[in-house]
Image: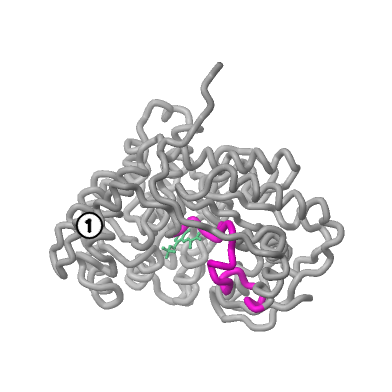
Amino acid sequence: MELPFAESWKIKMIEPIRKSSRSERELWIEEAKYNMFQLRAEQVYIDLLTDSGTGAMSDSQWAGMMVGDESYAGASSYYKMRDTITRITGFDYVLPTHQGRAAENVLFSCLIKEGDVCPGNSHFDTTKGHIESRKAIALDCTIDEARDTQLEIPFKGNVDIEKLEKAFIKYGDQIPFVIVTITNNTAGGQPVSMDNLREVRILANKYGKPVILDSARFAENAYFIKMREGGYETKTIKEICLEMFSYADGMTMSAKKDAIVNMGGFFATNKKDWYDMCKIKGIVYEGFITYGGMNGRDMNALAIGLEENTEFENLETRIKQVGYLGKKLDEYNIPYQRPVGGHAIFVDADKLLPNIPKDQFPAQTLAVELYLEAGIRGCEIGYLLADRDPVTRENRFEGLDLLRLAIPRRVYTDNHMNVVAVALKNIYDRRNDIKRGFKIKWEADILRHFTIELEKA
Ligand code: F0G
């Protein structure tokens, strides 16, 4: 008999979590104005709000924390981190920032001006926020197939090359760069193929435009390329990473995901002119160029985390757990964005709660139901997160309305996944009784989902 699959690590340290009663949760979620971000973490049993900064560091990473160099300038921890990043990405210039959006802020401050258009594949919310707050447009050029949650294709995060070329022709000089997010978080943690990255590069060259990779989950993207794209089966993850980055001029990185640290990020490039511009902004917003908002010990942990998480076994353990939850959901016929993505399952709320109209926010309603059912916290990636159109101020209902269940790296066991699956099944079984969603009581102009206040519709 073939031996079953098991994790490529064992557990050395545990953190207790606590269950609560339904009546406790009813009170807490009402106090939180039905906003998951306003709950206290201790009011949550299984926390799938995000995979960002929530991973479990390895013994080697913790060991690295003890020998961090906290010098203001020229810390050895910076050089260790820089050398690791250069080896894995091929980029020589590395500017640390306190997290991913800070790298966006530094870079976009140099590159974007009012009226610009930045094409890409489903920009992440902070990326869109940093573009739109500069009165520029984040133009989504994701392939149309990504919108059909039941369609199974291997690289559902890809850029539509025709849409991109149309954008180049239409907006010309208004385009400062193309930004490709690997994996494509908003479309469901879906990967972008090497072929697609190559095509983007060729087209960008034709129109003289630089390419940036939003790389929060680049190692997971490399895993999918190895598993799904012809010609990469025998390549190592590190070889695949080097090729992916060879098609870009620079990268922004939230190290809280694939570098498995609790805080950290960076911008990296081979363009000296970009680095020289960015380092000035970096000093103003983040800190000196060899720490940029990070502790020395955190830079050590980042270097070690990147090294570990660009190895196949670690990625396989992680992505197979997400797949395990997907299989459980299949048993119960729960509709989600197919195929299963790298870091999360994205449940299709429109399909799961057919009686909730769009303007009552089905995915948010499902998030509240799942919390009430079992103390599980997910995150709406849908109509609330989409914010209002900056010009018309109307809600944007054109995209998908999904409940994201993001799995932290190396944190929960498959038993926790079983609880999540059954909780969703119970909601699915009583879906016809769920008829009321939510309406907005108060909202911010931008990135409203973090602070929004809701009431029952
Ligand atoms: N880019 C992508 C693709 C992301 O998913 C995120 C963060 C960022 C940039 C910003 O990085 O948080 O370090 O400032 N995503 C988290 C999430 C918050 O839950 O998906 P950050």
- Residue 37 lies in magenta, yes or no? yes
What x and y, as percent, mark residue 206? 39, 50
* Residue that badge 1 annotates: 66
252 left or right of 449? left
From this viewpoint, which residue is outermost toward the bottom?
442
Q: Identify the image quadrant of residue 444.
A: bottom right
The answer, for residue 436, to whether it is visible in the render is yes
Quarter of the image with the C terminus is bottom right
Q: Can residue 165 be seen from the camera position used here?
A: no
Q: Is residue 437 above or below residue 141?
A: below
Q: Nearer the viewer, residue 368 or 437?
A: 368
Farthest residue in the right direction? Answer: 432
Q: Position of residue 102 (x, y in %)?
A: 36, 69
Name which residue lies at 61% across and 77% down.
452
Q: Position of residue 340 (x, y in %)?
A: 59, 43
Q: Residue at the spot x=69%, y=82% of the render?
A: 441
| Image-based side of 334 in relation to 203, left or right | right
Asked if residue 290 is among those painted magenta in the image, a careful observer would answer: no
Type of residue at label 1? Met
Q: Which residues are magenta?
A: 31-52
Determine the residue positioned at 39% across, 63% down: 100
Q: Residue at x 43, y 27 (%)?
A: 233
Tag 1 secondary structure: helix
Q: Is residue 89 left or right of residue 359?
A: left
Where in the figure is residue 386, as x and y percent of width and height? 61, 67
